[in-house]
Amino acid sequence: MTEYHIPVLELVLTMANAVDLVSPAVGGHHKRVTYLSSQLAREMGLSSRDTFDLVVAAALHDIGAFSVKERVETLEFEIKSPHAHAEMGFLFLHRFQPFLRLADIVRFHHVPWNDGRGTTFNGHAVPPSSHILHLADRIDVASLGGDIGIPNPSGVLNRINQERGRTFNPEAVDAFGAFAAKEYIWLDLRSSNLDRILSDTLSQQVLVLDDQSMLSFAQLLAHLVDFRSRYTSTHTAGVAETARFLAELLGMDQSHCRRVRLAGYLHDLGKLAVGREILDKESGLEEQEFGLLKAHPYFTRRILETIKDFSDIAIWASAHHERPDGSGYPFHETSQPIEARIIAVADVFTAITEDRPYRAAMNLEDAANTLRKMSAGHLLDHTVVELALTHRHELDKARRSAQTEASEQYAAIMAQAV
Ligand SMILES: [Fe+2]
Ligand SMILES: [Fe+2]
Ligand SMILES: [Fe+2]
């Protein structure tokens, strides 16, 4: 059994970077809210366990808002219907055991304090940290848009104070009041060094995950990507299982196969940067849209390499559009590790056997022919393709069952969504 050790800082930066990819226009929101939450936690004397839950929740609190439009709406000071994205975030997060407590924090991060009545919402107990996160989130929103690039602290403080007791927990507002006059807080928020500043602020706690929890963590990230387009709602599950199967056929040991499967789940993470309208487009993308789509493996690599334990996975996952003849993108590497070549084959195989908005799925024999041609044209690894062709029926069965399972999960989550 493998154990993964992920320091809280790496976890927070990875999640915040991934979630912020969706709305680059308001870039850095999740990191700033993490910073503000950790300042509030310190001022209020939260335990290290509560602080851990709060800062990780802060790093991903708007994870349930999938589109740019939804994201921009969450950044209005008075949000019209704030609970749908919070509930969606909860539905994702509570499936991952280590995030159970923080799933509840996310679920209620827009519940107003309501003179104390906000300790419950729709019959559920609201965790005290939800109210701290709510405040941190609104402080960031209130401080956006300063003309000269730095916020106006007294304006922000006044605005927050007006809502003391009504929207925000008074104790949290007072904690904010205790540090709001310190200039460095506001300068930190706008600093290009915020990553390093967070590393000083966050504890040295490490999240230890076994194989099973690591798999559900990767699935959690994969869901984020897949759920944005109904056409691709099971794509990564298909790629992950196909890749694992090919790794096994190549004689890799079980723990190695599991790492390849993780890379399969994570390969399209960078698609978070690509708008739904582009992903779902029926035909011909504009040149710029195509440029953005082609950037997705780049973002996959940059996000994943933040986790040191993932340095190999980051490379395997992000080289799936590289081609042995160098004609791929975005790194134009000609020699890729075998794990990357496996994922490239798994990605093509899964993509062509799925329905897409602009074409129907290929049958297995046509798919086999396509792989054969790509291998002959040096676009896919010859050995991996030969293996896939020899075992195509088993491979296809494994892929299908993984995708059926994923589509049941998708349906289950969507059925609960508000
Ligand atoms: Fe939100
Ligand atoms: Fe891709
Ligand atoms: Fe893909």
Image (spheres, rainbow, N blue to C red):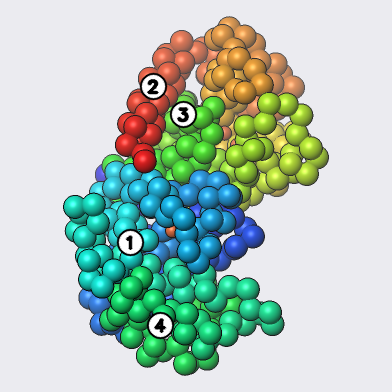
Q: Nearer the viewer, residue 42 or 3?
A: 42
Closer to us: mark 3 or mark 4?
Answer: 4
Instruction: Identify residue type, mark 2.
Output: Thr
Q: Is residue 77 in sight in this rendering?
A: yes
Instruction: Identify residue type, mark 3.
Output: Thr
Instruction: Identify residue type, mark 4.
Output: Asn
CB-based contact (under 8 Å), mark 2 and mark 3: yes
Q: Nearer the viewer, residue 303 or 279?
A: 279
Q: What residue appears at the point 41 percent right and 58 percent down from the top-left corner? A: 61
The residue wearing badge 3 is: 234
Q: CA distance from mark 4 to mark 2?
A: 51 Å
The residue wearing badge 4 is: 161
Badge 1 marks a residue whose secondary structure is: loop
Q: Nearer the viewer, residue 300 or 73?
A: 73
Closer to us: mark 1 or mark 3?
Answer: 1
Q: CA distance from mark 1 to mark 3?
A: 33 Å
Q: CA distance from mark 1 to mark 4?
A: 17 Å
Local crowd at mark 3 within 10 Å, few (<14), some, or many (≥20)?
A: many
The residue wearing badge 1 is: 111
Q: Earlier in the sequence, mark 1 or mark 4?
A: 1
The residue wearing badge 2 is: 404
